[in-house]
Image: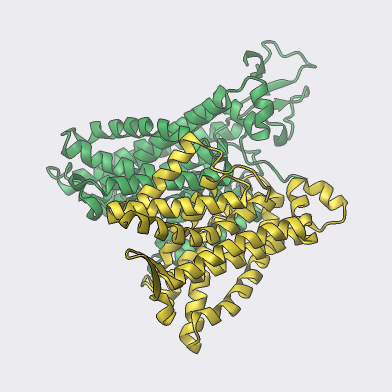
Chain colours: A green, B yellow
């Protein structure tokens, strides 16, 4: 495994190809992302509460979509049961703050750890299935989680329960705190995806995507890598669930365990561009804009979104970000390596290793 | 005796699940597509039947004559227009496309018919039953559904093993490239398989509508139950699917006998136990489908 990592030669001779990771776009990306984060972090000082609340829902969409993208776009695991972790995150936050008496901002990391711990045994069950059957299996597990939670009267059974942890804060403060929590969630989700996919695990996933048997024979620990991503995605999705609970203050089993959460994640990722760090962000912004624009159309926005996602799946597999980036030539978050020809000119993006975009058309 | 009755009711319920699962099994067997729109399509068929019954006043059994062929055409069209293209894209495309269809169709049903529950009125046959001994009651409708489930499974098995089209389908399943070289139009074969699968889904959806109430959200559970039947039975075996369906039905009815809110949960737990302790299913790969 140690030899499979491409390393840049220390003294590039004129005839030797050079390998480079960062590009001009990634520096521009960094130059935009950092000030943007600072501007967003100051929003509670200049934005009204309603806009902050809307941004929190956008942030939770970015977090959950990034996590679904980590699972499917990089790990090749299409889960339609991620609502399990939305629900677990929401309920764990309520339980930890009310019964266990933790402060809300201590409870959030504990919630994530709990979800990760729950996801480990679940992965052993779910990994018995593959492909589409894995997808439905994860859904069954989410249903089991819902059916088990409604058995507990202390959690409000079928009627649900309320989050009281913020009751001693003024509404303005509460919204600002939840807003910062959401923004921190986005930064964390994007950074974790980026760093994980730059790492050896990410490189392994590129190999798994191309051929898991060949990858395994080269020493890539296929199941272990998948389990790692499964658990990380569970933790991140639980964070999104905690964000949902913290902004709505109301936790109902039928709404937090709704399949529609996973539908939103999938549509966001597919529309934005599956297998890219940028895709879920773009997709979430598109969805958010649609939600605002078509707000009075009720469920029609979900119908439109689903139809768009089907069309994009069939005709534009790299999504909107693929369109913007010229099929991966421009990357704000470079997770792969770029091979530079001896003359110093970049080889086409198809030569890039580690860009875990979905496979192109097969013959 | 109450438990024996639960067992009998479970087997009868298994008939419906077998009918639901057969199409899922067939589509996976032939094109390796897991159709996530399976349950929603069953529900769509029930709504189509509802519209027919409501507008013409015919019996739901008569409406089957229209609904099942319409669903067959729907299946052919979806495969031809959507899923063949998705298969050519490779990767996650077929799964994402069927998921998109499932969500869009469910929301469209919700928009059109509202969230209210409906049912297909079949008249007295829906409530008539005969008794065995003092405590076991067998509903005629339930018996018809079980009979239909077994007939569809046996019929598909015979179709796949005995007919030329069935052989061509299995050839496409085994090695599509070679099948094409032999002159088989794999795209057409896939579409025929999908049309058969969706026709059986239509039948299952109609029976579900006659048996109980349905609402736009109930398609979810239909897909989950069909899937559990397939996995409990063992992938790639239609007989296994029948056994899995009956096992699931029995588990649900016996669970509901313990506590009405446990029925579905016990079914899920039986499924998860099979997954944990016997992941190849009860009757793995005896017959390829």
Q: Left or right: B255 with respect to A281? A: left
Q: Horizontal placement of A30 versus A14: left or right?
A: left
Quadrant of the image for the N terminus of chain A?
top right
Residue A129, given in percent of the width and then of the height, sits at 54, 39
Q: Nearer the viewer, residue B214 or B274?
A: B274
Please tell me which residue is depicted at 54% across the width and 42% down the height of the picture.
Answer: B281
The percent position of residue B86, horizontal first and vertical second, equals 67, 54
Q: Is residue A159 above or below residue A89?
A: below
State the residue lying farthest toward the front.
Answer: B133
For the view shown, which residue lies furthest in the right direction? Answer: B182
Residue at 79%, 56% in the rendered image: B168
Q: Is residue B103 visible?
A: no
Q: Which residue is drawn at 63% across and 41% down?
A: A358
Number of labelled discs?
Answer: 0
Give above or below for A126 relative to B131.
above
Percent x, y of residue A262: 45, 50
Locate residue A346: give its quadrant: top right
Query: Residue B48: percent from the left, percent from the top?
Result: 52, 76
The image quarter in which residue A92 lies = top left
Direction left: furthest residue: A168
Q: Residue at x 41, y 59 (%)?
A: B8
In the orientation shown, which residue stands out farthest toward the top?
A: A11
Along the viewing direction, whichever of B16 and B225 lies nearer the viewer? B16
Is any atom of residue B130 visible in this view?
Answer: yes
Rendered-image quadrant of the C terminus of chain A = top right
Q: Which of A87 and A164 is in front in this view?
A: A87
């Amino acid at each position: 495994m140690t030899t499979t990592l491409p390393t840049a030669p220390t003294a590039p001779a004129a005839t030797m190809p050079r390998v480079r990771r960062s590009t001009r776009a990634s520096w521009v990306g960094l130059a935009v992302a950092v000030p943007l984060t600072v501007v967003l972090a100051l929003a509670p000082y200049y934005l009204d509460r309603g806009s902050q609340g809307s941004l929190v829902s956008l942030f939770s969409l970015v977090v959950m979509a990034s996590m679904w993208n980590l699972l499917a776009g990089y790990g090749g695991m299409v889960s339609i049961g991620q609502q399990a972790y939305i629900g677990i995150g929401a309920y764990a936050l309520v339980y930890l703050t009310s019964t266990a008496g933790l402060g809300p901002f201590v409870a959030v990391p504990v919630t994530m750890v709990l979800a990760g711990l729950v996801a480990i045994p679940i992965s052993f069950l779910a990994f018995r299935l593959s492909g589409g059957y894995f997808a439905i299996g994860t859904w069954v597990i989410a249903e089991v989680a819902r059916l088990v939670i409604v058995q507990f009267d202390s959690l409000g059974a079928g009627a649900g329960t309320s989050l009281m942890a913020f009751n001693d804060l003024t509404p303005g403060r509460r919204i600002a705190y939840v807003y910062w929590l959401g923004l921190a969630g986005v930064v964390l989700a994007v950074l974790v995806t980026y760093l994980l996919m730059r790492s050896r695990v990410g490189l392994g996933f590129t190999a798994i995507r191309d051929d898991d048997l060949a990858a395994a024979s080269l020493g890539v620990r296929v199941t272990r890598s998948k389990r790692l991503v499964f658990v990380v995605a569970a933790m991140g999705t639980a964070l999104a669930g905690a964000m949902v609970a913290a902004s709505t203050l109301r936790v109902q089993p039928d709404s937090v365990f709704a399949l529609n959460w996973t539908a939103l994640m999938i549509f966001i990722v597919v529309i934005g561009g599956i297998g890219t760090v940028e895709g879920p962000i773009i997709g979430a912004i598109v969805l958010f804009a649609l939600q605002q624009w078509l707000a009075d159309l009720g469920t029609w926005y979900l119908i439109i979104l689903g139809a768009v996602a089907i069309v994009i799946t069939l005709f534009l597999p790299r999504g909107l970000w693929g369109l913007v980036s010229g099929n991966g030539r421009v990357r704000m978050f470079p997770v792969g390596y770029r091979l530079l020809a001896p003359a110093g000119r970049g080889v086409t993006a198809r030569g890039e290793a580690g860009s875990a975009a979905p496979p192109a058309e097969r013959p | 005796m109450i438990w024996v009755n639960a067992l009998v009711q479970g087997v009868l319920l298994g008939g419906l699940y077998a009918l639901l699962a057969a199409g899922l099994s067939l589509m996976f067997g032939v094109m390796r597509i897991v159709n996530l729109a399976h349950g929603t399509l069953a529900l769509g068929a029930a709504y189509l039947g509802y519209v027919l019954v409501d507008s013409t006043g015919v019996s739901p059994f008569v409406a089957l004559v229209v609904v099942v062929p319409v669903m067959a055409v729907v299946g052919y069209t979806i495969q031809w227009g959507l899923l063949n293209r998705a298969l050519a894209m490779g990767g996650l495309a077929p799964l994402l496309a069927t998921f998109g269809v499932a969500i869009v169709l469910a929301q469209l049903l919700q928009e059109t018919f509202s969230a209210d529950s409906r049912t297909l009125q079949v008249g007295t046959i829906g409530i008539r039953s005969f008794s065995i001994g003092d405590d076991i009651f067998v509903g005629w409708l339930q018996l018809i559904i079980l009979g239909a489930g077994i007939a569809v499974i046996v019929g598909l098995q015979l179709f796949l093993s005995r007919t030329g089209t069935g052989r061509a389908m299995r050839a496409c399943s085994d090695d599509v490239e070679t099948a094409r070289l032999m002159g088989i139009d794999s795209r057409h074969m896939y579409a025929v398989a999908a049309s058969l699968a969706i026709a059986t889904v239509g039948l299952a959806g109609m029976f579900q509508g006659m048996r109980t109430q349905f609402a736009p959200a109930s398609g979810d559970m239909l897909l989950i139950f069909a899937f559990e039947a397939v996995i409990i039975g063992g992938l790639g075996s239609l007989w296994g699917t029948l056994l899995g369906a009956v096992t699931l039905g029995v588990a649900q009815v016996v669970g509901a006998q313990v506590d009405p809110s446990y029925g579905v949960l016990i079914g899920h737990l039986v499924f998860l136990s099979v997954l944990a302790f016997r992941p190849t299913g009860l009757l793995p790969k005896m017959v390829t489908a």
